[in-house]
Each structure stands twice: as C-alpha cells, then as structure tokens.
Image (cartoon, coloured by chain):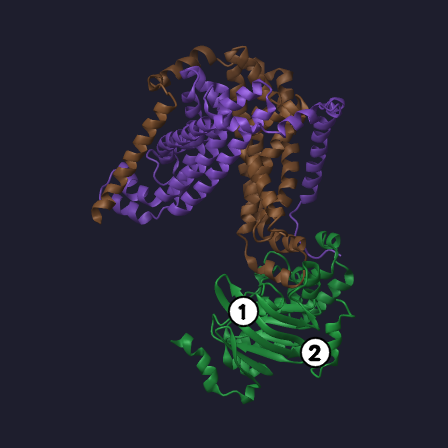
C-alpha cells in the first residue's frame, strides 16, 4: 500500500489514532433490494465488535462488503487509512491478505490435509509457481504447524479435513485466518453450525488468539448471550441500519429484544 | 379443469403425429422402402457382407492403421484434456478471472468446436494440412476440447462455493483459487470424465480416417468405394471389436478410480 | 517443502509410462507423418484465409436446408425413443422380463448401437434402403438407442419400488407393471435425455450429406466437393447458429420437464 497516501497521513493525525477500520455510509444492494442503508462503524485495535441482528438484517452482507466479497454500492471503507472501494483487483488482493476471515461453514478444502488448509492462508504471499507446485517454504510450514498446535490440533495436522468434527474444523479455519498474520479478523457466524458447548470453546479461542496478537475482531453473531459474553462493543442491525451501539454493560435488553421482534413474529 | 388434464396426452399425441407426417412429407421420405427393410438388411448382410474377409484385417497395413488410431487417440486426448482445463476454468461462471472478456471467448470456443462434427473437422483439417495423422489428431483435439471442456466446466460450476470464498477472502489470485479451492473438489469427477473422453475420442478416431485423416477409417473408405463388401464387413467388425474392448477397459479404469478414492 | 499429499501407489510409474507413450505418439504424428515443408509452403495458410471469409450471400439459400436438418434430427430422436423403449425394458435389471438372458440381450444391444459410428450405420442403411433422408434418419435413430436406452434403464433401476410391488401384488402382468408402475415415474427423465440427444443429433446430421440425406450436410458436402471454402465456412456458421439456438431451447425444455 502507498505509504505516502494523503489519506493515511490524515488518519495518523486524527485523534482516533488506533482506528484500524472505518466504515462511512456503507450501502449495498442485491438487484433492486437495498440490503445496507448507510452503515457507520469504527473498529480500533483490541476491539471485539459483535454485530447482532435478526437474519436478513444485513449482517453477513456487511462483513462481506469489507473485503468486497460482496461489492458495496456506496460509501467508504477505510482500512489502515486506505479506502478499499476504488482499489483495482491486484491492490484489493494485497489488502485482503491483511484481513483474515472465519466462516460459518468453515469453508475448508475437505479433501486436503489440515496442514494444507492452514498453509493456504498464505497463498496471497506465495508466488504462483511455488504455490501451484506446492513447494511451500520451510518457515511457512513451521509457522502453520505452530498455529495448528496453538488451536489444539497438533496430532491432526496430517489428517484430511473431512475426517474432523465441526469444532475441529472451525479451529482449522481459525488457524488458516491467523496464517495471514491479519490486521483485522472478520468472523461470520462462527458458531451457528456448532453445538452450544463447542460454540463457547470456539469463541473463547477466537477471543484469546485475537488478544495475544492484538488483532481487532468484527464478528457477526446471532446468539445474544454469546455476544454479550465475549465482545467489547456491540452493534445492533435491523433492516440494513445500525439501531444501537455500545458496551455490553450499557445495553438494555429491551432494545435488543426490539430488533429481534420482527423475526419472532 | 379435469377435462383438460385428460385431453393433454391426446393433444400431445396428435401434435406428434401431425409433426411426424409433416416432416416425412417435407423430407420426401418414401415409407414403402421401410417395408421389408429388416428382411432386406438381413439378405444384404448374408449375401453381400457375410462371411467377413478376415484376412483383410490381419494384413500388416491394416494392423499398422490400428496402431495409428491408438496413437492419434492418446496424443489427441492428452493434448485436448490439457487444453480443456484452462478453458473450463475461464468459462466457469463462479471461477472465471474475467467474466466479460475471457469467459465469453472460452465459452464460444467450447460451443464452437462442439457444434462442428468431428468428421467435418477431419474434412476441413485435411484440406488445410493435407492427408495424414496430423489432420486427424487436430480434429480429435477439437472434439476432445468440446467434449471434455463442457463437462469440466459444468462440474466446476457445481462445486461447493465455501472454499472458493475463503481463498478469495485471503487474497489469493484467481488462478490460486481455482487450483486450491476448486480442483481438489473436482479431481474425482474429472478423472472419470477423462476416462470417458479417451473412450469417446477413440470411437471417433476409428472413423476420422474416412476422409484421409489417418487411422483405420481410410480402409473403410477404400473397401466401400471398391464395393468390397466382405472386406467392409471385416473392418466394421474389427471397429466394433476395438470399441467394445476400449469400453470394457474404460469401465474397468473407472472402477479402479472409484476404489482408489474410497 | 511438500506437505502430506496422499498419492495413489504407482502413480508416478503410470505417469511416466503415459508421458513416454505420448512422446512416441507425438513423434510419429508430428515428425514421421507430417510434411512440414508443405506446411511451411504457405498453402495451408492460403486455404485458411479462404475459410476465414465466409460467403454470406449463401446464407439465404441455407435456411431451407437448416429446416430439413432440424426435421431430420427431430424425427431421428423420436424414432430413437421408440426403439430405445423396449431395449431399456430389457436392459433394466429390476424389470427385465426373462431374467439374466434378456438383461444381457438388452445391454448388448445398447453396446452395439453405441460402438458403431453414425457414419458406419449410415453406410449400412444406404445399402438396405437406398440413398436419401431415410437412411440418415435410421442411422441417427439406431445410433441414439444406445445412449437413450442406457440412461433410461438407469432411471428405471432408480425408481421407487413401492408402486411396482403394489401392482405385482395385485397380480399385474410385467407389461402392466411397466405401464402403470414405472412409466409415470421415469417420464420426465426420459424426455430430458431425448432432448439432450436431439441436440447431439443436429450435430450428427451434418455428416449425413455423405449419404445424400439432404439438409445442411448435403450443402456442406456440395461446397466441399467444389473446394468452395468460403461456402463451407458459411454452412458451418449456420450449423453453429442452429446449435446455439438448439442449446438454448433444449436447456429451457429440460428445465421445464425436470
């Protein structure tokens, strides 16, 4: 990224110096349907922001707009002081390397080993020839093994991903995201495909690794109790708009219930 | 309306009959020639074609042409499959690096080579590069591209999008996304398609020679033109034999592949 | 460093053997059997240049043959369907009437149909019924039986056994089982594969000009015999257009029935 970018200079000088991600007036639409109607959001270092809201509120779209897996229709996304929206594909790919992502359905390559899957987190930094022949650098493999050990799968490193349980697969997903050495973690419903006890373990792991490495986290989550237990800040989304924002302690249950009301009915 | 539902099949039948009689009229088909056709085929077979002249197909020239047919098959299949891989990648909706430029181009190539029958390719290529195995091989490569390219790209379009999304999110290039997110998912299917392709290419290879593009087909043409019916019978039988052998082989190979993956 | 990718045993041996065979074939085809001096002489390029300028004035005269081609392919697909039904009946393991015997017969008929190229079939039928559209249609129909009957037999083998048992239990004959237990279940799949085959038959019908079957095939062979490559290119363009339209229609039609 261009270090002399005037926008970056501005970011350094403004008071919110530790801001990693700044979203301004973000809009997105699927055809005719407006999904996001002007979202503003800041994520700073050591933040663990939970986005809650009923299904269809635009949570998943919001997360995917940030790394442009879904193309936003308007607004600004400043990541590390650089607006991501106007970036051309090569520059976008470089920016994506700094943003790790964890998925609801884990999204592993089932037929490859745990180690292969984790190493793949580093594809963006690996030359085409080296990656296509799978001649990974030794230090990359070592780093992947260390991460696999950190998420507690040391003895599974050379097993195929389709042999693992749901909780174990999500741990592989976490290791893969960390392999990018990301400056931001996007997490999309990490626990919806897991049973409650394992969901808690997975959330604990995400929280721990993020704290160790000072990586801010932006996490979609359906389960309010989990959100309250793990986040430092919470954003409630409804119909593509942010309805409230605040620390877990300061949020009253009534307003949370309110945005879920439509779904209950 | 219950009446309508009962009428449906009758209407379909009526429509079919109308169409068939129109088409027969239009194409000037003399149905009387159909009458006794089976008997006539029988007598033609027994009187003219039988017994097959087996000596014709064990002469070394003919056996040489069988070898040529095998060579063209292998050469064309390997080359065609290797070319089909990038084409399939470029033309798969979910993986193409360039939806507006390369995807339409790749799709046009696949549909275009498919639209032209392999025999027509053989004729055209013989007129371009002259008689011989090169023309036949190129025709078979075109056939293989259309055959495997379409099936490859269809299987790519039906993969699980999860890994693709994950790799894309990590900043991998679209070639890397294809290689690591998609290929492992289709490896099995592609192996089966490839074996199937060898089989189909071989079947085509037995006859492209009819227009001088190398292989067994040339002998078929010569003996047909000379009305050497006993030779024709032997050649047709030998073609059927090698095709059935190749089909048995490909069935066996697909079994092996299924087992090695289990 | 390569990480734990499982490779099947002997894979590298097979790969090496395949590559060596490929090199051998390539040598035979590209070196031994090709006259590169002639290739470089410019003749192929001149011919190619003539192909590259299709004779568009011909297109108006090609509309009628195009219609004939469509008619032939459609008739052939119909006839193929009619011929394939009994063969599928014989070759479907769960309903074949006379056990192993008829099953093997059915499967053999499919193999014979598929293992003879449409051109060989056409030559055979010419000697039985003379030149014209009829031998062409018969050739395509017989050639279609293999694929149609096989996919149909597979569809029949996959049907739910409940209704069949019910009819058998009620004392229904094998034919009644077929008509009331199976046909309703497999009809959409049948129509789907006939439409698929129709698409292929349009393609195939272009070579039937060889047996005087009319349609675009005849136009093509006529231009070819005159070495009118611009005309050949025009015919091929029309075939291409026909196939594109056919692909569109067959795609829609298959989606509608399945």
Asked if one can make out residue A193 in the rendered structure from this viewpoint, the answer is no
**Distance Cα–Cα, label 1 vs label 2:** 24 Å
* Relative horizontal placement of residue A1, taking residue A70 as reference (left or right): right
| x and y percentages locating residue B74 in the rendered image | 64, 33
Return the chain for callout 1: A
Chain letter tied to brown: B
Return the chain for callout 2: A
Residue B50, relative to residue B198: is it above or below?
A: above
Q: Which residue is mark 2?
A: A214
Chain letter tied to green: A
| x and y percentages locating residue B197 in the rendered image | 57, 37
Residue C9, relative to residue B37: is it above or below?
A: below
| x and y percentages locating residue B77 in the rendered image | 62, 35
- Tag 2's secondary structure? loop
Determine the residue positioned at 43% across, 45% down.
C252
Determine the residue positioned at 57% across, 85% down.
A246
């Amino acid at each position: 990224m261009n270090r002399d970018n005037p926008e970056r200079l501005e970011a350094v000088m403004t008071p919110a110096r530790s801001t990693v991600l700044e979203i301004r007036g973000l809009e997105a639409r699927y055809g005719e349907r407006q999904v996001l109607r002007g979202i503003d959001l800041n994520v700073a270092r050591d933040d663990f922001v939970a986005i809650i809201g009923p299904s269809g509120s635009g949570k998943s779209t919001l997360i995917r707009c940030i790394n442009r897996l879904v193309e936003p229709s308007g607004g600004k996304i400043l990541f590390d002081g650089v607006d991501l929206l106007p970036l051309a594909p090569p520059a976008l790919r470089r920016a994506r390397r700094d943003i790790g992502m964890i998925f609801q359905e884990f999204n592993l390559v089932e037929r490859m080993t745990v180690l292969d899957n984790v190493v793949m987190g580093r594809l963006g930094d690996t030359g085409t020839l080296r990656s296509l022949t799978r001649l990974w650098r030794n230090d990359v493999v070592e780093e992947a093994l260390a991460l696999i050990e950190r998420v507690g799968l040391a003895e599974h490193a050379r097993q195929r991903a389709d042999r693992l349980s749901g909780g174990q697969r999500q741990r592989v997903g976490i290791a893969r995201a960390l392999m990018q050495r990301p400056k931001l973690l996007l997490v999309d419903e990490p626990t919806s495909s897991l049973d409650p006890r394992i969901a808690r373990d997975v959330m604990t792991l995400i929280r721990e690794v993020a704290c160790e490495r000072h990586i801010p986290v932006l996490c979609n989550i359906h389960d309010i109790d989990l959100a309250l237990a793990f986040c430092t800040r919470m954003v409630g989304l409804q119909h593509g708009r942010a309805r409230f924002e605040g620390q877990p302690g300061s949020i009253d249950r009534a307003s949370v219930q309110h945005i879920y009301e439509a779904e209950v009915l | 309306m219950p009446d309508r539902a009962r009428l449906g099949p009758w209407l379909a039948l009526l429509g079919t009959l109308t169409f068939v009689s129109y088409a027969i009229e239009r194409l000037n088909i003399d149905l009387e020639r159909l009458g006794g056709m089976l008997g006539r085929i029988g007598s033609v077979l027994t009187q003219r074609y039988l017994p097959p002249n087996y000596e014709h197909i064990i002469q070394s020239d003919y056996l040489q042409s069988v070898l040529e047919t095998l060579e063209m098959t292998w050469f064309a299949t390997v080359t065609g499959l290797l070319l089909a891989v990038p084409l399939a990648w470029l033309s798969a909706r979910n993986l193409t690096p360039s939806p507006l430029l390369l995807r339409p181009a790749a799709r046009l190539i696949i549909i275009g080579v498919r639209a032209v029958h392999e025999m027509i390719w053989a004729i055209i290529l013989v007129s371009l590069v002259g008689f011989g195995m090169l023309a036949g091989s190129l025709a078979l490569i075109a056939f293989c591209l259309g055959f495997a390219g379409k099936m490859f790209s269809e299987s790519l379009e039906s993969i699980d999008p999860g890994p693709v999304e994950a790799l894309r999110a990590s900043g991998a290039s679209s070639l890397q996304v294809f290689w690591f997110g998609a290929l492992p998912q289709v490896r099995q299917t592609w192996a089966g398609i490839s074996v199937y392709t060898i089989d189909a290419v071989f079947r085509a290879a037995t006859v492209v020679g009819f227009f001088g593009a190398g292989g067994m087909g040339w002998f078929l043409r010569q003996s047909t033109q000379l009305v050497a019916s006993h030779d024709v019978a032997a050649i047709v039988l030998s073609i059927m034999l090698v095709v059935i052998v190749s089909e048995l082989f490909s069935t066996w190979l697909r079994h092996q592949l299924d087992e090695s993956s289990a | 460093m390569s990480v734990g990718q499982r490779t099947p045993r002997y894979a590298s041996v097979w790969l090496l053997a395949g590559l060596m065979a490929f090199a051998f074939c390539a040598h035979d085809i590209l070196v031994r059997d090709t006259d590169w001096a002639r290739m470089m002489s410019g003749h192929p390029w001149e011919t190619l240049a003539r192909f590259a300028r299709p004779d568009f004035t011909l297109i108006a005269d090609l509309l009628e043959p195009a219609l004939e081609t469509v008619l032939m392919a459609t008739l052939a697909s119909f006839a193929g369907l009619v011929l394939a039904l009994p063969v599928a009946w014989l070759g479907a393991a769960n309903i074949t009437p006379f056990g192993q015997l008829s099953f093997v017969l059915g499967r053999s008929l499919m193999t014979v149909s598929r293992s003879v190229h449409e051109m060989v079939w056409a030559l055979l039928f010419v000697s039985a019924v003379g030149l014209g559209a009829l031998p062409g249609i018969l050739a395509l129909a017989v050639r279609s039986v293999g694929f149609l009957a096989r996919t149909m037999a597979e569809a029949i083998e996959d049907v739910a056994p409940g209704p069949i048992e019910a009819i058998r239990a009620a004392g229904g004959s094998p034919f009644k089982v077929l008509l009331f237990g199976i046909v309703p279940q497999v009809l959409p799949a049948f129509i789907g594969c006939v439409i698929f085959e129709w698409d292929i038959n349009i393609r195939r019908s272009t070579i039937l000009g060889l047996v005087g079957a009319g349609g675009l095939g005849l136009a093509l062979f006529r231009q070819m015999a005159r070495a009118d490559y611009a005309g050949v290119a025009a015919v091929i363009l029309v075939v291409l257009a026909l196939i594109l339209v056919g692909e569109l229609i067959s795609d829609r039609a298959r989606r509608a029935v399945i």
